[in-house]
Amino acid sequence: MNSHTESLRLTDDERLDWLRLIRSDNVGPRGIIATILIVWMGIVKEHHWDLLRERAHERTAVLEVEAAKANEAAGKAHERAAQAEQRAAEANLEIARLRAPRILTIEQQRRIADAIRAYKGISFDTATLVGDTEALTLLEMIEAAIRAADWSQINWADTARGLRLERPGQPSVGNISITEVMIQFEPEQRGGLKAPAETLASALRAAGVAAIASEAFFAPSTAANKTAIHVMVGKKF
């Protein structure tokens, strides 16, 4: 027996009510039949509404599942969009950093001077990419910090006699083609100049300037000032 048939069966109380109605002297055959039809139609109608409500509930459940999935997908899309925006913002900050000129504030210059003051009296010369205003500006800030530590600046000199930048009242600056900042010393001066060169490079990095210290890698070196530390500022990478 299916659920539809099962729902149309009468209970014991309903059977008794039908028997009383049939045996009643006040109700004729036509009345009984009409009454039966009315009651039966009411039962069928009620069952029809039960089916509709059941289907509506099922459809509602399906829609709720679909809505939950849609909300989950939307949440993930929103999260991906937020992550993309964050990456874009980080990229823009990095681009701005790369485009910004390298500078040393007065406070940063003071800290660099304090870091290397223990090596006062050391000679140094400087070089930059002649024609690069940003590199020259940074070099002059570094020169000021080093001189404040009582290091002795001398004219740049090299055996190749290349292009030099002559500055009235200041030591001349050599012309080099490198990137970032390099603090170099001659291999034969490793014992006396390695420590101050590395200390200077470290102080520059602490101030946000990319710098490394190393032995002169030219073979043979063209630097004429063999006992000086070579401070070279190249193009920003």
Image: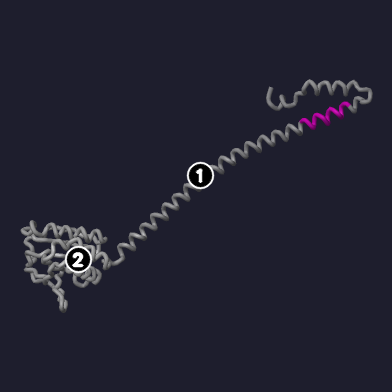
Q: On the picture, is 87 further left or further right than 130?
A: right
**Residue underneath mark 1:** 72
Quadrant in which the N terminus is drawn? top right
Q: Residue at x 19, y 61 (%)?
A: 115
Alpha-carbon span between mark 1 and mark 2: 54 Å
Q: Magenta stretch mostly in which secondary structure?
A: helix
For residue 175, side relative to residue 54 (left or right):
left
Q: Amino acid at mark 2?
A: Val
Q: Please rate how many residues cluster around mark 1, counting C-alpha atoms within 10 Å: few if below 14, some from 14 to 19, many from 20.
A: few
Report the disc number at residue 236.
none
For the question of whether residue 174 can be seen, the reply is: yes
Percent from the top left, x then y, of residue 95? 33, 61
Q: Secondary structure at mark 1?
A: helix
For disc 2, the marked residue is 233
Region rendered in magenta:
32-43
Vertical placement of residue 218 versus 24, above or below: below
Asked whether residue 34 is drawn in magenta, I would say yes
Could you tell me residue 84's position as x and y percent?
A: 41, 53
Residue 46 image-quadrant placement:
top right
Q: Nearer the viewer, residue 122 or 209?
A: 122
Please report the residue visible at 26 percent of the width from the left and 61 percent of the height from the top.
207
For residue 181, what is the image quadrant?
bottom left
User: Callout 2 environment at 10 Å: few (<14), some (14 to 19), or many (20+)?
Assistant: many
- Residue 186, compared with residue 4, is above or below; it is below
> Horizontal and vertical percent for residue 188?
5, 58
Kind of residue indicated by mark 1: Glu
Instruction: Name which of mark 1 and mark 2 comes first in the sequence.
Output: 1
Magenta-span inclusion, residue 225? no
